[in-house]
């Protein structure tokens, strides 16, 4: 396959070499970085204008196969040796149709900041990042095997221009190299392979090389990441990320021995990774890490003023081919991310996943703006697929507008800032509290109105009248109750005076007390009369009247008996009789008094319960 | 007639079953060897085993020696209610001795019994304190209050008379004694007013004052310790979810033994959706909920033969076990070891 491509390009070079002979690459230095799961190729090109016309763009081409895995391409002007790199400028790169060139090539055009005149030269750095371009070989390994990867590329820089001098350095993660293509001028320095220098090669020259090497770096590939960024003007940006992660390296076959892995993880299980590190923005709070089962407790969080680092361990070590899924969420302060310009607000936040060295197959970023945002526009540093949605959340009437940005083949270089612009009037912020306040207000008003409204249909209906009368009866009974209690209090006072008598022997005081008691009782009886008559006349009080009457009669009996007892005792004292005699005489009375008192109490209780 | 027919059908159904309507578990209550002879799977459940002696103390703690006191208290006097409670406690003690799960039945009975015992003890002690602090006269009125109300007046006048003579004798004594007498008067008045509730036939037993105070204090302390123990037992033994075990690391952090959830998460993400998992029935519900896979037997399987099949597979040599699991279409087997 590589050989045929080679031949094709040689013939193509012969056929098409007259084109584009203005520009010549005088020096090309290529560095291939294979230390992680993504392949980063940095090419430093020194372009020289040998033709007559001024040239304003440089073409960079890739074979189809490589272009499929190309995830990120950027070009930076190189200020050259000796000068500080302050003046390096990112050059715009866009894909172009290649005319008059061999097929199965994809071309990108780098626009120079100013046209290159005759004889001038310009140096630029081109960074190309490839995801999924390292193939694990062998594809299935056991738990204790090391992971070997295969990398294919060309020793000569594939370019539509003539290349005067070039060199290639391949940097490997470890010193262990299984095999590599040996061409002329190939040297090994530690874990680097150097190809070159090669001189004076025609355009479209291609020489395939294959490097088979060991790499035990974590191969974390996320099949899908959904990042939801919810903005709340009350001061918080809530980011929720859902991950579906698989280990993209060599798949594991055979059994997994936890015992071996736990005892010596580097010898038994070198191809697995146990944790992932995420760099969150500084001042991130309320960080959670959970999956469908629940909270995952194996995580560490520490932060300083520049970043917050979160180290998460999935529930089990990730061997090749194993999948897992989890959710990370955190909150960020709003003032770090929301800004204003020209009357529009915009949010400036990073696009990619915060996890280090992760390749995402499909990344979906949803930015949820507050309700009432209008004129939404997105500006991103690389092409993304945009769409709109609505999300209904707390206290939403019409829903919040959601901007959905989708991108595939995302590598860590894509973790740049993007902006979403929108307009939002500050008054609309008051809508939510006003809604709550008015809701509760109307609820309370309704309750008040309902309580005080008179819902009776007709004022002269019998049930309504009956209700009114019953209320009157109840009031009267209350008053009767009161009076009876006062009577009982007077009885108690008289008894107390009796006891005083027995203690001090003062008959006069007793007689005086008795007089007072008598008058009080008479008054109370007078008060009782009109109430009783009202009760008799009222029609509603039927069942109560009998009980009340009983109560009154008993109370009167009690009164009489008490008076009799009092008089006997006083008599006895005047006659200076002994205690036993007194006791004999009032015995019968006393019994009746206590019995009556008990009955009166019971009746009072019964009436109270009505 | 319909009623009789229904009852007749019911009797026929019950009589036709080989165990006359009793299920396996309840029969093993009456005959503890029944399960191990005929239905070994019931005998294999650890909750169906007889309890050990320490487990009684762990569950009902102090009540273990308050219950006999309560039984004695129920016998004097023996009324309908107290004989019911005695029967309840005796049968529940027997049944909880057969199956440790029935400790739940013993617990309310034990609480009631020890409550009775404690309340009797408190009555005696506080009565002694009251007697010791308030002197003899209140004893008389107290004892008198126990009689029917007609006698209470005689008691009152009895008290009146000696008091009056006392008074006349001590007329010229100090204020202190007068205050004491007034106190006694007040006490009598209160006793008079509240004398309406007679307590049928109670004889007051009197203990020394210091002993009574210490006794009350110790009983309260006992109750407090019991509460502490109950809270601890509920937190440690009855609320701890045993799916996650924790321990302290050297630097004060919490180390979590999360191997169950790890296994269930692995099953959830790395197996096909309709793969079946065989395990012992203890893990059935957890596997279904957390791993989202079909299990062969779980906590609610009534088919003992099915559980026995899985048990046979677990305890056979590999070749035989493989055949059994193959016939059940099982792809994964979950075992707990270590």
Image (cartoon, rainbow, N blue to C red):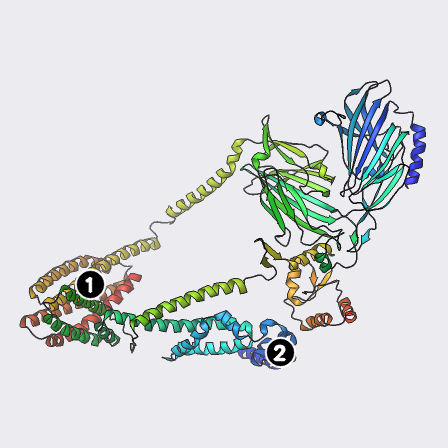
Say which quarter of the image contains residue A15: top right
Q: Are marks 2 and 1 in contact (CB under 8 Å)?
A: no
Query: How many residues crowd around disc 2 within 10 Å: few (fewer than 14), some, or many (20 or more)?
Result: many
Question: Is A226 in front, or is A129?
Answer: A129
Question: Is A155 in front, or is B269?
Answer: A155
The residue at which mark 1 appears reads as A488
Left or right of B205? Residue A222 is: right
The chain letter under disc 2 is B
Identify the residue at horizontal 68%, vertical 58% (top origin): B263
Q: Does A117 sit above or below residue B98?
A: above
Question: Is A405 in front, or is B250?
Answer: B250
Question: Is B228 in front, or is B144?
Answer: B228
Residue A144 place in picture, x, y as percent: 78, 55
Identify the residue at horizontal 14%, vertical 64% (top origin): B175
Name the disc covering residue A31, or none: none
The chain letter under disc 1 is A
Query: How many residues crowd around disc 1 within 10 Å: few (fewer than 14), some, or many (20 or more)?
Result: some
Residue A220 place in picture, x, y as percent: 73, 46
| Residue A522 makes an appearance in the image | yes
Residue A174 place in picture, x, y as percent: 78, 45
How far apart in space, not on screen, are marks 2 and 1 (Cα)?
73 Å
Q: Nearer the viewer, mark 2 or mark 1?
A: 2
Name the disc covering residue B35, or none: 2
């Amino acid at each position: 396959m590589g050989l045929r491509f080679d031949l094709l390009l040689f013939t193509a070079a012969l056929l098409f070499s007259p084109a584009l002979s203005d520009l010549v690459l005088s020096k090309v230095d290529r560095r291939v970085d294979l230390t992680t799961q993504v392949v980063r190729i940095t090419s430093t090109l020194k372009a020289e204008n040998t033709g007559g016309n001024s040239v304003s763009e440089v073409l960079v081409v890739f074979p189809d196969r490589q272009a499929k895995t190309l995830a990120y391409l950027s070009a930076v002007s190189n200020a050259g040796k000796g000068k500080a790199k302050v003046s390096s400028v990112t050059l715009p790169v866009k894909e172009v149709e290649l005319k008059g060139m061999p097929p199965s090539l994809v071309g990108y055009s780098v626009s120079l900041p100013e046209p290159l005149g005759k004889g001038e030269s310009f140096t630029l750095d081109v960074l190309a990042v490839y995801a999924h371009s390292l193939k694990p070989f062998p594809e299935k390994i056991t738990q204790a095997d090391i992971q070997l990867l295969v990398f294919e590329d060309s020793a000569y820089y594939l370019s539509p221009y003539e290349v005067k001098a070039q060199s290639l350095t391949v940097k490997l993660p470890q010193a262990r190299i299984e095999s590599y293509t040996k061409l002329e001028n190939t040297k090994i320095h530690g874990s680097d392979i150097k190809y070159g220098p090669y001189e004076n090669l025609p355009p479209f020259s291609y020489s395939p090389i294959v490097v088979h090497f060991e790499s035990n770096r974590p191969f974390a590939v996320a099949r899908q990441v959904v990042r939801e960024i919810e903005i709340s003007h009350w001061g918080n940006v809530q980011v929720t990320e859902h991950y579906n992660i698989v280990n993209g390296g060599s798949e594991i076959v055979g059994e997994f021995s936890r015992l071996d892995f736990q005892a010596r993880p580097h010898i038994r299980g070198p191809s697995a990774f146990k944790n992932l590190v995420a760099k969150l923005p500084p001042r991130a709070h309320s960080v959670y890490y959970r999956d469908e089962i629940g909270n995952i407790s194996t995580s560490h969080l520490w932060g300083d003023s520049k970043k917050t680092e979160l180290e998460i361990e999935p529930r089990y070590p990730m061997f090749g081919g194993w999948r897992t899924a989890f959710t990370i969420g955190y909150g960020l302060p709003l003032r770090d991310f929301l800004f204003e310009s020209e009357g529009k607000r915009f949010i400036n936040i990073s696009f990619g996943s915060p996890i280090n060295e992760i390749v995402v197959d499909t990344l979906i970023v949803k930015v949820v703006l507050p309700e009432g945002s209008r004129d939404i526009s997105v500006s991103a540093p690389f092409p993304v697929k945009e769409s709109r949605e609505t999300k209904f959340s707390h206290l939403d009437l019409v829903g919040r507008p959601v901007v959905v940005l989708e991108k595939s083949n995302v590598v860590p270089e894509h973790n740049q800032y993007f902006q979403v612009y929108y307009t939002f009037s500050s008054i609309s912020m008051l809508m939510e509290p006003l809604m709550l306040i008015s809701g509760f207000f109307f609820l309370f008003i309704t309750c008040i109105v309902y309580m005080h409204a008179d819902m009776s249909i007709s004022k002269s209906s019998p049930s309504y009248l009956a209700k009114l009368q019953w209320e009157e009866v109840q009031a009267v009974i209350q008053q009767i109750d009161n009076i009876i209690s006062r009577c009982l209090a007077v009885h108690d006072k008289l008894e107390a005076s009796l006891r005083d008598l027995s203690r001090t022997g003062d008959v006069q005081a007793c007689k005086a007390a008795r007089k007072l008691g008598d008058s009080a009782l008479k008054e109370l009886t007078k008060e009782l009369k009109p109430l009783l008559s009202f009760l008799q006349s009222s029609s509603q009080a039927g069942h109560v009247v009998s009980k009340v009457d009983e109560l009154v009669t008993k109370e009167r009996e009690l009164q009489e008996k008490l008076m009799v007892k009092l008089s006997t005792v006083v008599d006895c004292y005047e006659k200076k009789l002994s205690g036993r005699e007194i006791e004999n005489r009032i015995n019968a009375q006393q019994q009746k008094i206590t019995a009556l008192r008990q009955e009166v109490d019971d009746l009072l209780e019964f009436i109270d319960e009505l | 007639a319909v009623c009789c027919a229904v009852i007749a059908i019911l009797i026929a159904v019950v009589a036709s079953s080989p165990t006359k309507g009793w299920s396996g578990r309840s029969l093993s209550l009456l005959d503890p060897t029944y399960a191990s002879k005929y239905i070994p799977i019931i005998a294999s459940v650890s909750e169906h085993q007889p309890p050990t002696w320490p487990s009684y103390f762990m569950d009902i703690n102090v009540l273990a020696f308050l219950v006999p006191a309560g039984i004695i208290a129920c016998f004097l006097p023996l009324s309908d209610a107290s004989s019911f409670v005695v029967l309840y406690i005796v049968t529940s003690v027997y049944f909880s001795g057969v199956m440790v799960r029935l400790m739940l039945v013993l617990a309310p009975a034990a609480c009631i019994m020890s409550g009775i015992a404690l309340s009797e003890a408190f009555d005696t002690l506080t009565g002694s304190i009251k007697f010791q602090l308030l002197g003899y006269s209140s004893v008389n009125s107290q004892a008198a209050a126990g009689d029917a109300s007609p006698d209470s007046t005689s008691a009152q006048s009895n008290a009146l008379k000696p008091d009056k003579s006392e008074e006349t004798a001590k007329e010229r004594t100090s204020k202190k004694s007068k205050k004491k007498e007034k106190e006694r008067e007040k006490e009598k008045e209160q006793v008079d007013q509240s004398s309406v509730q007679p307590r049928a036939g109670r004889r007051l037993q009197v203990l020394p004052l210091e002993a009574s105070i210490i006794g009350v204090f110790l009983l309260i302390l006992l109750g407090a310790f019991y509460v502490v123990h109950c809270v601890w037992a509920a937190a440690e033994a009855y609320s701890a979810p045993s799916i996650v075990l924790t321990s302290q690391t050297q630097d004060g952090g919490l180390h979590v033994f999360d191997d169950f959830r790890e296994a269930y998460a692995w099953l959830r993400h790395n197996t096909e959706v309709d793969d079946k998992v065989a395990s012992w029935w203890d893990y059935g519900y957890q596997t279904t909920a957390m791993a989202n896979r079909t299990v062969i037997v779980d906590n609610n399987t009534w088919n003992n033969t099915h559980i026995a099949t899985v048990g046979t597979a677990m305890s056979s040599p590999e070749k035989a076990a493989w055949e059994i699991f193959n016939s059940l279409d099982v792809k994964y087997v979950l075992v707990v070891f270590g």
